[in-house]
Image (cartoon, rainbow, N blue to C red):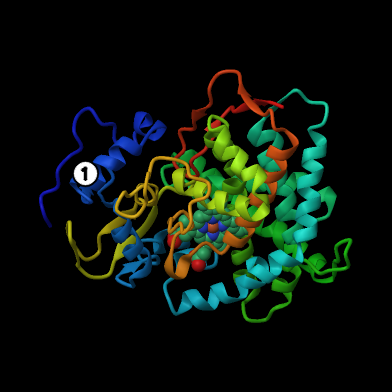
Amino acid sequence: MKASRGLPADLAHPFSPRGRADPYPAYRWLRANDPVHFDVTSRMWLLTGHADCALALRDPRFSAALGQRERVREDALPPSMLTTDPPEHQRLRSPGALLLGPAAIRGIAAGIAREVDEVMAGLAGRTEVEVTADIGEPVATGVLARLFGLPAAARTEFAGLAARTSVNLDPLAGPKEAAAGRAAMGELTRFLGAHADRALGGRDEDGRTSPFGRLAADDRLTRPEMLGVASLAIVGGWKPLAEMVGNALYWLLPRPEEAARLREGGEEAAGTAVDELLRVEAPIPFIARVTTEAVPLDGGTIPSGARVLALIAAANRDPAVFDRPDDLVVTRSPNPHLAFGGGTHFCLGAPLVRHAGALLLHDLLSRYPGLRATGSPPVWAPSLVPRRLDGFTLAL
Ligand code: HEM
């Protein structure tokens, strides 16, 4: 292990309350000065360069399963694909394509368009809205309700459970919140179990079985495993999707030329823009792994059995890979950002996020070209995952 330098005194630690508001100066310093950094506060190795982070996500010497075993037992939940290594990982992930693969998303595209349209129609007559409560959360709930074939009457309970379980995403949540989040997981699993049988026979207004119905009918997984895949999609998906719109507008509204490019370029341009918006403000800023053996990197050797955080929010602004890394360039292509991770655990929800995000942002900016922030400037919430804003109000 090499001696690791500490951050200069004037830079806030990226996980401290001050650093969470703006972690980018610390990320920049680490990437330039100590890209393989042992952090004494978290007792973890922090990787900040794009090449090192991409390697940690793709190389089997970085395990997603090690270090998670205690947590899985404590939760009394079936093993999750997120915390499993190959070959077991592939067994759990393959059927997940029935729920979240490109064909599943194409199958509910008309339903997603109706959901976005309904949320937009609900804004008519309003002069001011709060982005997450009035747009992000209702859209995330509607989109996931389509995936799961949920009847209208179940949506409020579903949204409550999705909100309560989303705390499980935050590794630094306090013990009380974490315990509440785990308890809510049990409730979510029971809720999904009750809906699985209905989803098997249920049809939407276009006569289709929901993607969840097709997953539930598949026999490659046991029922608890199938419910584990489904609940992971909700825990990993609802909150990041709900918060994405606020983060996107935070960047777009002060840059009207970029917003105009997104609005005027049609849906394909909006899809390219979604990737760029996720690059500059990665909602999941880091990914944890544990090394199975010592791994020599240019910036130093990580010992075996070490806990590693690939700081993808830092990698996404690496000047070795991205021109003008701190600027929003909505037409950026190619865009090898790591906001969806990489390798075998690459976000299974990415087709859904790209599709729904592009549709929503394009629709919102087209319907409300005068959209502007109002009230006090929004602040970044203290939670680390997902990175999100508190109290972002807009005048329509
Ligand atoms: C802006 C929104 C989202 C972002 C930034 C995001 C990001 C990520 C990242 C970084 C990973 C990799 C984690 C790792 O390697 O340990 C991941 C995995 C995953 N995501 Fe997403 N996600 C988003 C939305 C969604 C949605 C909407 C869903 C489903 C409805 C979803 C489902 C999943 C699943 C199932 C995995 C696990 C894949 C595996 O372990 O093989 N995500 N996501």
Relative to 290, 120 lies left or right: right
Residue at x-position 61% and y-position 52%: 269
Residue placed farthest to the left in the image? Answer: 3
The C terminus: image quadrant: top right
Q: Is residue 236 visible?
A: no
**Residue 303 image offset from top left, x and y in percent:** 19, 62
Secondary structure beneath label 1: loop
Relative to 144, 277 lies left or right: left
Location of residue 5 by image quarter? top left
Location of residue 248 by image quarter? top right
Location of residue 351 by image quarter? bottom right
Number of marks in the rendered image? 1
The amino acid beneath tag 1 is Val
**Residue 191 image offset from top left, x and y in percent:** 71, 56
Residue at x-position 69% and y-position 58%: 190
Residue at x-position 61% and y-position 70%: 96
Report crowding for label 1: few under 14, some 14 to 19, many 20 or more residues within 10 A (C-alpha).
Answer: few
For disc 1, the marked residue is: 40
Q: Nearer the viewer, residue 346 or 67?
A: 346
Q: Is residue 127 visible?
A: yes
Image vertical order of residue 110 relative to residue 65, above or below: above
**Residue 43 image offset from top left, x and y in percent:** 25, 48
Residue placed farthest to the top in the image? Answer: 375
Image vertical order of residue 291 relative to residue 369, above or below: below
Residue at x-position 34% and y-position 73%: 60
**Residue 166 image offset from top left, x and y in percent:** 57, 47
Relative to 333, 393 lies left or right: right
The N terminus: image quadrant: bottom left
